[in-house]
Image (spheres, grey):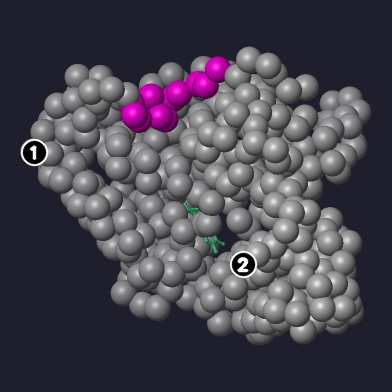
């Protein structure tokens, strides 16, 4: 059901973002109770903090949604080697722009979250790996770290305790693959951002400099702060079982009010978000397709239906508009919540051009280590390119999907899935449109999904 009244936002992570008069300096942050949770946390036992994070059920916000407490549990604490904490601020997934809002508009929240996490994991050194293009973001963070150091929240004897921990900023190398956690670690070590094979290189065991390492996303570290503030069990009451907390939906594309909206997990549907908060389609247009959680998540088609059973056995039959906004429900529809970077396309969109655009990106960003990803992504890029330029055959449509099927699950890192999933989902859902375009091109006509004259 589409709510007439827009759903209420639940601003936990974005509490200070875009608030009139809120500034990014430490004085303003402290006026809004900043660093109080770090002061509280530092008096606790690290293992108790880790237990709170486990109890909260909070899942990582970098895309894969792995439970953070569980990831921390895998850290090898017996090796005697230093433990590192790394904040993944690479944010290169097309359609995703949530982390940069935190960095640009509330940097101390991130620093507080990192310091709590570093203390909880007995780390004496943290890193923020920030996307190379975020020059101002890096400057803002450097300034904020200096302020926090002067105030005793970073560096030696944090909050007057015996605990010391530094944060260093590393500017990224400008490649999408440097956001993949093991590629990021290689890049942080000064090498080319080639992902490592897992196992044995699980960061929790063999990460940065072959030491146990925690890699978490910007937003995840911020959630940790709120988990420690409320306590794990209280935090778990926000959202639903299996997906606690809030999600930031960064909506872009063909809606009246694109932007970011923070909502309690499972509290409303895609319809509520896209019609209620984002104002619906542009005048005279209809929604056609949705990439729900960043460009690597499987595409949804407006008009298709999703049927099945919920974990408690209740049957469901949803259109895209009915899908509840939580990781479990979105997963039941064959796609992923990912980073929540939703890309909306209306009926003026040529779905082949859209796929060609994604294929060009993923082909360009393959690091080239694995044959299926290196070759497959380039073939997909070439094929959709030629389909758009009018020299394709009808057999190319099923062939596209066949190639994607040969990539997924056969590579070192999940970039293979990022290459395959858009194709594997778009081809069956928009096959008729692709075939029509090829047929029209063969007969000299130009394809026009919107039905109005092309210039
Ligand atoms: C190709 C690729 C690119 C990725 N890019 C990012 C990124 O830019 N930022 C991010 O936080 N995670 C990214 N990830 C996910 C990370 O590998 C990792 O799972 C995440 O940072 C872990 O944080 P979390 O547990 O807090 O979600 C990427 C993964 C892949 C496969
Ligand atoms: S899947 Fe692609 S990006 Fe990942 S390691 Fe293999 S070639 Fe590189």
Q: Main secondary structure of the magenta part?
A: loop
Report which quarter residue 13 is drawn in. top left
Q: Is residue 165 above or below residue 231?
A: below
Q: Which residue is mark 2?
A: 357
CB-based contact (under 8 Å), mark 1 and mark 2: no
Q: How many marks?
A: 2
Location of residue 180 in the rendering, given as x and y in whole percent from the top left corner: 50, 62
The C terminus lies in quadrant: bottom right
Could you say which disc has been placed on residue 150 in the image? 1
Q: CA distance from mark 1 to mark 2?
A: 47 Å
Q: Is mark 2 within 8 Å of ligand 1?
A: no
Location of residue 2 in the rendering, given as x and y in whole percent from the top left corner: 73, 23
Q: Write the start and end of the magenta stretch as one range.
A: 7-18
Residue situated in front as seen by the camera: 375 or 154: 375
The N terminus lies in quadrant: top right
Residue situated in front as seen by the camera: 310 or 27: 27
Q: Which residue appears farthest toward the left when viewing the image?
A: 150
Please report the residue visible at 8 percent of the width from the left and 38 percent of the height from the top.
150
Give the crowd class for mark 2: few <14, some 14-19, many >=20 residues within 10 Å: some
Question: Residue 59 vs residue 266: left or right?
Answer: left
Q: Which residue appears farthest toward the top when viewing the image?
A: 5
301 magenta-colored? no
**Would residue 289 be seen by someone viewing this image from the given angle?**
no
Report which quarter residue 398 is drawn in. bottom right
Residue situated in front as seen by the camera: 262 or 393: 393
Please report the residue visible at 89 percent of the width from the left and 32 percent of the height from the top.
317
Sequence order check, earlier mark of 1 and 2: 1
Location of residue 306 in the rendering, given as x and y in whole percent from the top left corner: 86, 39
């Amino acid at each position: 059901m589409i709510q007439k009244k827009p759903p209420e936002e639940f601003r936990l992570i974005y509490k200070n973002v875009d608030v009139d008069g809120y500034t990014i300096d430490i004085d303003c942050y402290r006026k809004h109770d900043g660093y109080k949770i770090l002061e509280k946390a530092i008096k606790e036992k690290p293992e108790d903090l880790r237990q709170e994070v486990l109890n909260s059920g909070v899942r990582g916000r970098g895309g894969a949604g792995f439970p953070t407490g569980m990831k921390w549990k895998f850290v090898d604490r017996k090796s005697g080697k230093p433990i590192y904490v790394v904040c993944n601020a690479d944010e290169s997934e097309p359609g995703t722009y949530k982390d940069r809002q935190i960095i640009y508009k509330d940097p101390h929240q991130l620093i507080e979250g990192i310091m709590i996490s570093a203390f909880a994991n007995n780390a004496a050194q943290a890193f923020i790996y920030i996307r190379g293009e975020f020059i101002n973001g890096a400057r803002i963070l450097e300034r904020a770290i200096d302020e926090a150091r002067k105030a005793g929240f970073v560096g030696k004897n944090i909050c007057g305790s015996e605990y010391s921990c530094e944060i260093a900023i590393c500017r990224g190398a400008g490649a999408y693959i440097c956001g993949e956690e093991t590629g990021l670690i290689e890049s942080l070590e000064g090498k080319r951002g080639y992902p490592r094979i897992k196992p044995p290189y699980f960061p929790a065991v063999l990460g940065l400099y072959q030491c146990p390492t925690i890699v978490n996303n910007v937003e995840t570290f911020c959630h940790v702060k709120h988990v420690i503030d409320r306590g794990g069990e209280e935090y778990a009451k926000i959202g639903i079982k299996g997906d606690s907390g809030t999600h930031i939906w960064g909506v872009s594309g063909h809606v009246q009010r694109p932007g970011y909206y923070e909502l309690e997990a499972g509290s409303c549907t895609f319809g509520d978000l896209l019609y209620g908060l984002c104002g619906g389609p542009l005048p005279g247009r209809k929604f056609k397709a949705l990439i729900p959680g960043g460009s690597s998540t499987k595409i949804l088609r407006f008009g298709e239906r999703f049927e099945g059973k919920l974990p408690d056995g209740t049957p469901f039959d949803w259109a895209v508009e009915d899908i509840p906004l939580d990781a479990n429900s979105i997963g039941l529809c064959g796609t992923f919540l990912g980073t929540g970077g939703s890309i909306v396309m209306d009926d003026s969109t040529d779905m082949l051009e859209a796929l060609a655009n994604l294929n060009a990106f993923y082909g360009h960003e393959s690091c080239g280590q694995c044959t299926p990803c290196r070759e497959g992504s380039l073939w997909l890029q070439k094929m959709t390119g030629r389909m758009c330029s009018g020299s394709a055959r009808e057999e190319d449509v099923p062939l596209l999907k066949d190639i994607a099927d040969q990539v997924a699950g056969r590579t070192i890192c999940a970039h293979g899935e990022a290459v395959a999933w858009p194709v594997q989902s778009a081809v069956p859902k928009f096959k008729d449109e692709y075939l029509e375009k090829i047929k029209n091109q063969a007969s000299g006509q130009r394809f026009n999904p919107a039905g109005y004259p092309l210039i």
